[in-house]
RNA sequence: GGGCGGAUAGCUCAGCUGGUUAGAGCACUUCGUUUACACCGAAGGGGUCGAGGGUUCGAAUCCUUCUCCGCCCACCA
């Protein structure tokens, strides 16, 4: 009777419910005495939409590790949560409202935030449901959201401390400004995109200046040359009057090493308000700053007749004006890096703005040391270099955002600030009295913090900080941080700095970096581009276990990989294989309980054969291998070993042997060990199969079973058994090439040192190779030699006839080819490649014939 | 401009600190329904491990140069 294939639908959800109801996701409720703690902080997914396969990789890795350590008998804690994701979420909600023709400015901050909270409610749940569907065994009783009251308290505490220590300061600087998002951004939120543009050569008094942004010309306050440039030395320090499209203007000529004499003409126009490099020069030479582009991306009043125009419009107009005035010499094509908003892709404007910054160098120093000393280990190691490079060149972090969605900056300004220059105060609530003017009226800073500020506290804020909770003591530093390399700086680096600052300890001991899941074309999956794949439909089709295996097996940490549906289907097949082994085992178990007469007394035969010793050795080896690899975070190799064992040893050999020489007790033992070892990888199917053996009682669930232990052993049976396997394979090979009917039993004679071993398993060899094996040499030379044994097969007459037939047809084929090649017409006129091909065919045919004749 | 990664069977990729005939899955060829499984079984074909040079008894693995892809960082107007 045929068994049904494994159908994950309807199996997975009830199992997840059982796990969750058991309370075992919470380490406090795990049975047994547990001393060692193992903890993972889940990188909180943004509440901006849906989970994609990239998240699924992370969840799979973390779940494998958590389940493994739980079964090892540790207090395994995996803390889940979601991230408010400031700017990303605000954009989504703005777009949503835009469809209804509403702008956030119309409805005001309070109402807008209500909309965002509603969004968060909807998508936050959706995402946690998706995490559940992936089988994540995280402790939902400890779930957090970055804007929960206690996490907000942590943010405020951290900010105020840094503020009071002088590490957070307010400054007017050139920052990246997104005209669409209407906010400042940090350096990391800028993507430099190489774009084709033009290089404009403009007459500037006695000079010619090359620029890519002629529109900033009206904001120029100086001209710069290299100090050693002989061509221009005489002008340095002089004020020149130059003709511009806004009339004559006086510009100072400065000398600065930043100028590359080889680029363009070696003269640079300096626009301190709208170019980072020019800003630095402006600071060095105390140049006036003329802001000619506003926060809305349009030209300001200072831009005279261009005021109100978009930057691109102003560029065209100024170029036209320059041309009309005869000041434009030439335009060359030129590619340069355009800064664009990481979130909305709008072209950014470098802008002078008053923002809050965090001093990073003092925080970076211990963070560098932590990785250098090995207190934090990054997997793969090569990311150390990237980390160090960024940390060593770290710049101050612009942490204020002109957004509504996020943690409002806990800074208060005295009403008299403008008149009396009162210093701002950092406080959760409105301060009682101004330190400078003793005034009592304050207004809170309207800006919010960069979303990564709160994420930076994540490992300890979710465990209760700033309170010294028991969780914090037990589970911090966490064991592993699992993430992808694209947020190494955004997040991982900042967590390390914050944890060392506020906790004086590292936030995690290991950073496990997974690769990005790429689409079919090898491109990064992206939610905003719509190339993200929703794992759920895939999981419904193939099962969550198959998805998880396809994301882990055959991948390497830090290495991006493509995912195809075929790969998922392949692992679905594997899961089904396991399912069917389960069917077989259950059947054998039933037979053992009530052995049918035909089976004699041997149905559950307990005699230990070489095959039994072999599978026991292999299982023991597997336990050791999987355990070692999981402990060293080599998930792919652990999983691969399991895959190979289950399919190619347990199923292909041991299960087949059971049909001849059963040892049901050992079969069950092996099978159950496999279920345990495979459980972290494929939790659903293994739990379902386990339930068939042990019921659905909470206490007997697979997820809390003890991890198998390996014993020290010699692999003697494995080596002996290999001889037998090789013999069987060799015989099958000969049968196949001689086209012996599958059912036809052949006589097999063997001789050699392994003969004895093989004969002890005579019934097995007979059945698996379809032969009648006996010891004894034949007079002719052996048909083959395999691992210390010569063997002779007596091929039946039919197959001899078959060979004769084949020989005859081959001979005809060879004759035909030879005739063709003897034909001069063919060899001279046909393409050389074709002739060559025919020659090759002939050689092959001859070789085959020779093989058959011998 | 600096740095990183990839290049292994037709395709997608494993291959740990150098060690016997370089692996897997899919695809392909032939055969097959016997006490689980056709989401299956058996047997097989297919690779000068990107190219050159070097170290070594021995290199896919270590060193070096080069080529082609991909990525990250960076104030070249």
Image: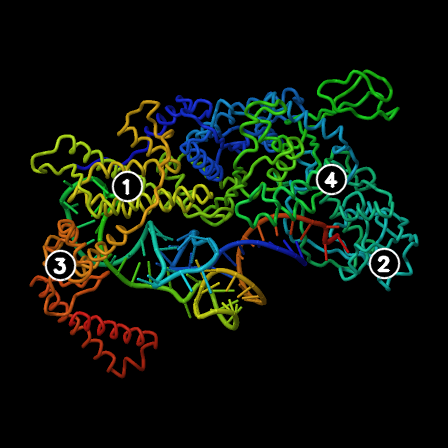
What is the secondary structure assignment of the residue under circle 2? loop
Chain letter of disc 4? A
**Tag shown at residue A227:** 2
What is the secondary structure assignment of the residue under circle 1? helix
What is the secondary structure assignment of the residue under circle 3? loop
Counting from the top left corner in percent of width and height, residue A755 is at 17, 58
Q: Quadrant of residue A449?
A: top right
What is the secondary structure assignment of the residue under circle 4? strand
Task: Identify the residue at horizontal 42%, vertical 44% (top origin).
Answer: A628
Task: Identify the residue at horizontal 37%, vertical 30% (top origin).
Answer: A703
Quick check: do tags 1 and 2 share a chain? Answer: yes
Q: Quadrant of the N terminus of chain A?
A: top left
- The residue pinned by badge 3 equals A740
Q: CA distance from mark 4 to mark 1?
A: 58 Å
Counting from the top left corner in percent of width and height, residue A370 is at 62, 41
Counting from the top left corner in percent of width and height, residue A756 is at 16, 56
Q: Is residue A498 left or right of residue A551?
A: right
Quick check: do tags 2 and 4 share a chain? Answer: yes
- The residue pinned by badge 1 equals A577
Q: CA distance from mark 4 to mark 3?
A: 80 Å
| Mark closest to the chain's N terminus, 2 or 4 | 4
Q: Is residue A745 above or below residue A36?
A: below
């Amino acid at each position: 009777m045929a068994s049904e294939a494994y159908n994950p639908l309807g199996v997975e959800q009830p199992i997840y419910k059982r796990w969750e109801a058991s309370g075992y996701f919470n380490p406090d409720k795990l049975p047994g005495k547990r001393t060692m703690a193992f903890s993972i902080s889940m990188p909180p997914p943004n509440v901006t939409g849906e989970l994609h396969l990239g998240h699924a990789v992370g969840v799979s890795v973390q779940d494998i590790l958590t389940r493994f350590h739980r079964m090892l008998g540790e207090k395994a804690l995996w803390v889940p949560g979601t991230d408010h994701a400031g700017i990303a979420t605000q954009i989504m909600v703005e777009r949503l409202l835009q469809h209804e023709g509403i702008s956030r400015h119309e409805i005001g901050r309070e109402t807008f935030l209500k909309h965002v909270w509603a969004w968060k409610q909807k998508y936050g749940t959706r995402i946690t449901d998706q995490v559940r569907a992936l089988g994540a065994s995280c402790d939902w009783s400890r779930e957090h959201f970055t804007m929960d009251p206690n996490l907000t308290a942590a943010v405020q505490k951290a900010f105020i401390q840094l503020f009071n220590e002088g590490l957070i300061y307010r400054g007017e600087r050139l920052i990246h400004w997104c005209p669409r998002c209407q906010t400042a951004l940090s350096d990391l939120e800028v993507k430099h995109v190489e774009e084709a543009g033009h290089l404009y050569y403009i007459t500037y008094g006695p000079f010619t200046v090359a620029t890519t942004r002629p529109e900033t010309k009206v904001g120029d306050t100086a001209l710069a040359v290299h100090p050693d440039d002989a061509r221009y030395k005489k002008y340095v320090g002089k004020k020149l009057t130059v003709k511009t499209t806004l009339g004559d203007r006086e510009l100072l000529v400065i000398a600065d090493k930043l100028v590359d004499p080889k680029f363009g003409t070696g003269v640079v126009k300096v626009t301190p308000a709208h170019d980072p490099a020019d800003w630095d020069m402006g600071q060095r030479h105390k140049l006036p700053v003329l802001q000619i582009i506003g926060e809305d991306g349009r030209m300001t009043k200072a831009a005279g007749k261009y005021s109100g125009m978009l930057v691109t419009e102003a560029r065209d107009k100024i170029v036209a004006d320059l041309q009309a005035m005869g000041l434009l010499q030439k335009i060359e094509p030129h590619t340069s890096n355009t800064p664009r908003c990481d979130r909305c892709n709008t072209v950014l404007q470098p802008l002078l703005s008053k923002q809050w910054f965090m001093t990073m160098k003092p925080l970076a120093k211990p963070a560098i040391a932590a990785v250098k000393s090995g207190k934090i280990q990054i997997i793969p190691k090569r990311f150390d270099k990237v980390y160090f490079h960024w940390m060593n060149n770290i710049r101050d972090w612009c942490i204020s955002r002109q957004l509504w969605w996020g943690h409002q900056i806990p800074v208060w300004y005295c009403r008299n600030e403008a008149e009396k220059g009162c210093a701002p105060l950092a406080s959760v609530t409105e301060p009682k009295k101004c330190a400078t003017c003793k005034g009592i009226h304050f207004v809170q800073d309207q800006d919010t913090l960069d979303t990564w500020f709160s994420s930076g506290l994540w490992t300890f804020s979710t465990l209760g900080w700033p309170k010294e909770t028991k969780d914090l003591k037990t589970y911090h530093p966490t064991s592993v941080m699992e993430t992808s390399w694209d947020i190494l700086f955004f997040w991982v680096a900042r967590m390390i700095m914050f944890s060392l600052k506020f906790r004086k300890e590292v936030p995690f001991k290991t950073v496990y970096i997974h690769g990005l899941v790429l689409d079919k074309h090898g491109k990064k999956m992206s939610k905003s581009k719509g190339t993200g794949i929703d794992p759920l439909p895939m999981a419904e089709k193939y099962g969550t276990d198959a998805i998880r295996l396809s994301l882990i097996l055959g991948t390497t940490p830090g290495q991006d990989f493509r995912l195809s549906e075929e790969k998922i289907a392949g692992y679905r097949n594997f899961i089904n294989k396991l399912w069917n082994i389960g069917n077989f085992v259950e059947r054998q178990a039933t037979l053992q309980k009530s052995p049918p007469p035909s089976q004699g007394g041997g149905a559950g035969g307990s005699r230990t054969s070489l095959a039994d010793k072999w599978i026991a050795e292999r299982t023991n080896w597997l336990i050791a291998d999987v355990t070692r690899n999981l402990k060293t975070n080599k998930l792919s190799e652990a999983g691969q070993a399991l895959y190979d064992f289950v399919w190619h040893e347990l199923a292909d050999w041991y299960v087949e042997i059971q049909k001849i020489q059963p040892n049901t007790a050992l079969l069950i033992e092996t099978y159950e060990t496999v279920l345990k070892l495979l459980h972290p990888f494929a939790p659903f199917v293994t739990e379902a199969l386990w339930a068939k053996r042990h019921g659905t009682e909470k206490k007997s669930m697979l997820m809390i079973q003890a991890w198998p232990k390996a014993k020290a052993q010699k692999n003697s049976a494995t080596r002996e058994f290999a001889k037998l396997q090789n013999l069987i394979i060799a015989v099958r090979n000969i049968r196949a090439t001689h086209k012996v009917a599958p059912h036809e039993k052949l006589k097999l004679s063997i001789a050699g040192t392994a003969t004895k071993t093989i004969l002890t398993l005579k019934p097995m060899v007979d059945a698996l190779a379809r032969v009648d094996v006996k010891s004894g040499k034949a007079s002719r030379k052996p048909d083959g030699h395999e691992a210390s044994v010569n063997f002779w097969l007596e091929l039946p007459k039919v197959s001899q006839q078959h060979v004769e037939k084949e020989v005859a047809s081959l001979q005809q084929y060879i004759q035909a080819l030879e005739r063709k090649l003897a034909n001069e017409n063919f060899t001279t006129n046909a393409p050389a490649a074709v002739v060559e091909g025919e020659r090759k065919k002939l050689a092959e045919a001859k070789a085959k014939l020779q093989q058959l004749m011998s």
